[in-house]
Image: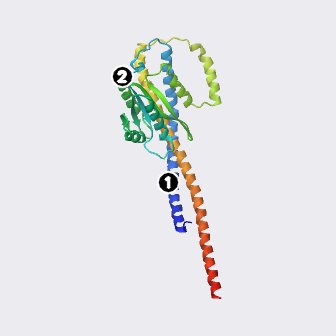
Amino acid sequence: MQNMRDIQRRISSVKNTQKITRAMKMVAAAKLKNAQDRAEEARPFFNKTVEVLRGVFTRTSEKEHPLLAEREEGRHLVIAITGDRGLCGAYNNKVIGLAEEIIKNEAETALIVLGRKARDYFSRRNADIMAEYVQLDDYPGYGFSNDIADVIIDHFTSEDVNKVSMIYTHFNSAISQKVQKMQLLPVEKFADTAEEVAQEAEAETDEQVEKAEGQEEQQAEKKDVDYIYEPSPAEVFDNILPQYLINVIYSALLESKASEFGARMTAMDSATENAKEMIEKLTLQYNRARQAEITKEITEIVGGAEALK
């Protein structure tokens, strides 16, 4: 059995760790609130972009555009969004795991990594990294998404790559985050994948469902309305498709940051509870050791008294 001094040192060490994890939980909780608000505020903007894009697809015969071109030859460019720091459970590992699975299954791949964790992991494995972005802001800006969209559009239009996919973590709640894979280029016809992501991103209440049903009835008569595009559908695509990519990337960054803070808050809460349980066990051990020491001293005193008789 450990002596009392060793147990006291362990209790003190665990208490110090508990203070750190509790503080990290509080910081993550504060950042989560802001990140969650930003992600939820961006969803209607993203959904509207998808709606407009779908409307253009369904109401025009113009289907030729550089960002819609499907090619068989070339690399598959994968954008992996992780965090710069750990201590957030399996948040980073799930994204890296899905990216690694794509690399194994594809003949030729390249990466754009966002976050130090993904950069370090794939750098150690000599992966083909086209670009890397580390030290990401806690609340990514729209301009940053624009820069990333410009990079992938340049690679795709110059035929360096034949497909671009993005792996990010969708935020459901503080205790629930789901890793998503989404194809960015070529933009999928009718934007089905984007619409599914948008629908999953918005948890509708019963009141919202009833409202949506009422709107469906009102819009039923408008489904077959033809649009007149000025100056032309091709130029409309020139504006909508890049804007669509920027909005998708921006939304994914916000979702990923909210997921990271939620995962970190949950992980630190669990670590704090585990530290509390460990302290209780160590305290019990300390009390037993103390009782054993007292019993031993009493026995020695009694034995000494008996020897003097």
Q: The C terminus is located in which quarter?
A: bottom right
> Residue, x 51% and y 52% (percent of image)?
21
Residue at 50 percent across and 17 percent down: it is: 55
Question: Label 1's element?
Answer: helix
Q: Residue, x 52% and y 65% (percent of image)?
A: 6
Name above or below for residue 171 compared with residue 75. Answer: below
- Tell me the amino acid under the disc marked 2: Thr
Side of 201 where 308 appears, left or right: right
Q: Nearer the viewer, residue 184 or 94?
A: 94
The residue wearing badge 1 is 20
Q: Earlier in the sequence, mark 1 or mark 2?
A: 1
Q: Position of residue 305 (x, y in %)?
A: 64, 84
- Of badges 1 and 2, nearer the viewer stands 2
Tell me the quarter of the image containing the N terminus.
Answer: bottom right
Q: Taking 268 as reference, is 281 above or below it?
A: below
- Image location of residue 15, percent across then percent down: 53, 59
Residue located beneath label 2 in the image: 157
